[in-house]
Amino acid sequence: MHDRSPLAPEKFPKLPDIEGVRLATARAGYKNWDRADMLLGEFAEGTVVAGLTTTSKCPSPEVEWCRSALARGKARALVVNAGNSNAFTGRRGKAACDMILETVSGELGIAREEIFLASTGVIGVPLPEDKAKDGLRQAFNKLSVGSDASWLHAASTIMTTDTFAKGAGATAIIGDRTVAVVGIAKGSGMIAPDMATMLAFVFTDAAVSPAYLKTMLAAATDLSFHAITVDSDTSTSDTLLAFATGAAKNAEITGPDSPGADALQAALTQVCRDLAQQVVRDGEGAQKLIAVKVEGATDYASAKRIALSIANSPLVKTAVAGEDANWGRVVMAVGKAGEHADRDKLSVRFGDTIVAKDGMVVDGYDEAPVAAHLKGQEIEIGVNLGLGEGRATVWTCDLTHGYISINADYRS
Amino acid sequence: MHDRSPLAPEKFPKLPDIEGVRLATARAGYKNWDRADMLLGEFAEGTVVAGLTTTSKCPSPEVEWCRSALARGKARALVVNAGNSNAFTGRRGKAACDMILETVSGELGIAREEIFLASTGVIGVPLPEDKAKDGLRQAFNKLSVGSDASWLHAASTIMTTDTFAKGAGATAIIGDRTVAVVGIAKGSGMIAPDMATMLAFVFTDAAVSPAYLKTMLAAATDLSFHAITVDSDTSTSDTLLAFATGAAKNAEITGPDSPGADALQAALTQVCRDLAQQVVRDGEGAQKLIAVKVEGATDYASAKRIALSIANSPLVKTAVAGEDANWGRVVMAVGKAGEHADRDKLSVRFGDTIVAKDGMVVDGYDEAPVAAHLKGQEIEIGVNLGLGEGRATVWTCDLTHGYISINADYRS
């Protein structure tokens, strides 16, 4: 497919096993490719789950199923299909989901409501039941002979147009136990060509109550998956699920005052942020990773909306692609966010160099250090509103000819 | 600069003079170019004005001035500068505006609050007062010798990166009088490279009360300038002003029940829509004009938001650039709009061909007529939500390599 992104990490990280999580991959053959494209996860009894799904009003049947199953907060299995998103496929798409639930439930002897589903790939083609069945059979066989898949293999299996496999890990000390948090993700553009898109799965051996896992995941997401944008488009399949097996046998974390809650939150946030940034690093056509840091806003929500307005602006993103310190476009994007802003208190910086301040360009502005910063692969745009204490960071990538080529030219 | 847009109208329309409006152009020399770049309009006593400006929180001092002067509803003069937007220029930008107001007020013997200002071009450089003064002197001289500028000349003078001059006209019968409505506009991208951007001025000899002119202009704008998007970016200088001289001496229109109110509204809307579509036709890199027609939404506002979500989606716009009937991306854009939508009632068409219906691709879908439609220059994407009576149309253009070249490569 496409070349490995120039912003990709050097290699896939070393990640520990998570006790209570077993993974198997299979070749369902959803596309005409020579690779595994189905991931089956089996979780020990007592595993709890929390999740977030796309806000799209036209979600896939998998997303609808996850939304309802998440209410129970318990998980025993996960099935991920790559190459076909099963989105917008009417009754037949829903029937394929039902078949998978029925098969896994029967094979593993677990309740349907403890099985989670995600599919990613072409929109509008019902997931072929025969291929799914065949894939499940392969995966069950592997589990039965103890042939577990590595994290790298699992992360590679769920890829579609991704140019590299995405994984991240962190540990946290809870009382006298060390727990691990591991995550894998796929996504490279909110929707890749015909592909519907971001999936992320996080696994930990920590013991956490389902309700508090949900709270922690929401907090981590706000600083990670909800703080990135490639092209402002929202997929019909976005799904983030976190599974906690409890195998580390720490005292269950049930709220912010439980011992180790802060440490686990930090590890979870770190893994989510690492994965989210990897998605941006694999943004379609991306040549530069852009961190947009807004401070001095009236509050956090306002800072976040201003940061997203800048990060979503095609004119800001094309300016970065052109290595152009076009602070006028940054001001434009602040202005259009609809948030409190006072033109005459605003300052804008690229890297460490303040370009505009108090409503106008700084006296004796020297473009040289800014030009040098913009030649790099990791760009920072800073905005200080000068109004309050609100601050937020959002990550995006530049908008290049590569994006147009991938999304407009791929049929030709 | 750039080649004339392939979507440009064949030629500038023939437009009638508007009694009570006199125009003069001048070469202030805001940029190093061989053309007029200042427009002065003088209006007969009794001329009323209504207007809308950008919602940006970081507007230019010209926009701030217009916002406050519009409260009086009376106009005697208009000054438009091209090549320098005077946006984000602090005190010095404001001083330049004050100088212009002072000079025009003294020369024409009119109140400052009856003078309207607009500037478009580079952000961040204060409008040079000496050049503005020199331009005003030239313009006053021309007015004093009765050397009026044509509509084509006026429309050409306010251009920046536009590839063609934009004008439109219509007439309305009010009682035993025929009144004319004429408009000019500039804009090609919400912000062109370093340029801050859309300006439109409409002139009529109809007699209208200021309050009702405002109501009519708002209604016309909703169906025109607020129904177009090139790249979702909002300029710091967008300004639309409508001047009514009353020279046609029709019975003053003061509300929807006044004789001729509907006819004048229709003419005003037609002129605004024509100008707005010309702005999209001059969209940066545009190769295709796209009309997004949404119907069956719960109400008009919902239909409009869904249409804008589709029209702003980079993935929909790149698909059209690639002549790809990618209805999955249209569904994605409907889903992300956050409005009421039922996946299983949704239908999508390209041109006259329904592609997807009742939540899935139509049986026996024949791509040939769709492919033929997508090869044309004027594309129509239709969405029926199947929920209610709400309908709205929005215009945009495709997203091409040309957009990236104009906005990312122009420094290299």
Image (cartoon, coloured by chain):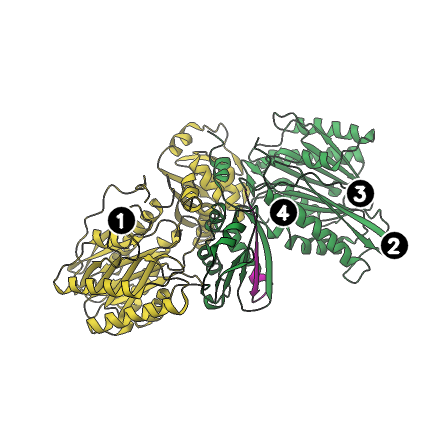
Chain colours: A yellow, B green
Q: Secondary structure at mark 1?
A: loop
Chain assignment, label 2: B
Query: What residue would you read off at disc 3?
Result: B18
The quadrant in which residue B173 appears is bottom right
Q: Count residues near mark 1 (Cα–Cα under 10 Å), then give few for <14, some for 14-19, many for 20+.
A: many
Which region of the structure is painted magenta?
Answer: B287-303
Q: Could you tell me how far apart the alpha carbons at marks 2 and 1 are, in whole angstroms?
A: 75 Å
Q: Count residues near mark 2 (Cα–Cα under 10 Å), then give few for <14, some for 14-19, many for 20+.
A: few
Circles 4 and 2: CB atoms closer than 8 Å: no
Query: What residue would you read off at disc 2?
Result: B176
Q: Nearer the viewer, residue A201 or B15?
A: B15
Going by the numbered disc 1, the residue's amino acid type is Ala
Chain assignment, label 1: A
Going by the numbered disc 3, the residue's amino acid type is Ile
Query: What residue would you read off at disc 1?
Result: A165
Q: Is residue B292 magenta?
A: yes
Indicate left or right for A268 with A305 as reference: left
Query: What residue would you read off at disc 4?
Result: B277
Mark 2 and mark 3 lie on one chain; the one further toward the N terminus is 3
Q: Could you tell me how far apart the alpha carbons at marks 2 and 3 are, in whole angstroms?
A: 18 Å
Residue A389: where, in percent of width, then height?
A: 43, 50
Q: Secondary structure at mark 2?
A: loop
Residue occupying image coordinates x 82% and y 42%: B20
Going by the numbered disc 4, the residue's amino acid type is Gln
